[in-house]
Image (spheres, helix red, strand yellow):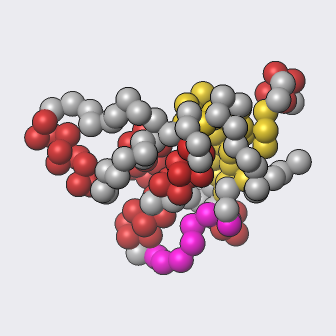
Amino acid sequence: MSNRKHNFVVGEYYHIYNRGVDKREIILDKYDLDRFLESIEEFNTPDQIGSIFELSFIKNKLGGSTTKSNKLVSLVAYCVNPNHFHFLITPLMERGVEKFMQKIGAYTRYFNEKHKRNGVLFQGKFRSKHVDSNKYLTI
């Protein structure tokens, strides 16, 4: 059962997923995939980081990663396909899932600017399922 109104509990596991609006592709090339994966890593913090573009200059200047150890969620597994994605995550703080997914939405801005389009990229709000047993993962 899909539930958009989960009360996400710290330490519990959730299957989070979404797809492109009208089943459109959300990843068109290697650069899009790299940017999506970088978004997963860099936006997984309660801190404001600005844009990934701006962050790249800070990383180059300081050398190395600027990713903080304080994370919103623990990303256990993920699958990114051309038109949809799946995450298996557990929140590490109150409202961690919601904050993480809101930040991931910034990928839409990148995608729209790069591909000269506007409007929504994803089909509504993300969907979620509570993972309450190992059996769910084998179906």
The residue positioned 37% from the left and 47% from the top of the image is 47
The residue at the point 31 percent across, 57 percent down is 51
User: In this rendering, would 70 be left or right of 77?
Assistant: left
Closer to the camera, 75 or 33? 75
Q: Position of residue 10 (x, y in %)?
A: 64, 34
Determine whether 23 is above or below 76 in the image.
below
- Could you tell me which quadrant the C terminus lies in? top right
Q: Nearer the viewer, residue 83 or 58?
A: 58
Examine the image and state in which quarter residue 25 appears: bottom right
Q: Residue 111 is drawn in which quadrant? A: bottom left
Residue in the picture at 75% in, 49% down: 6
Q: Is residue 24 above or below residue 84?
A: below
Q: Is residue 120 magenta?
A: yes
Does the segment drawn in magenta span residue 118? Answer: yes
Span shown in magenta: 117-124
Picture coordinates of residue 52 (x, y %)? 31, 52
Residue 30 shows up from this direction:
no
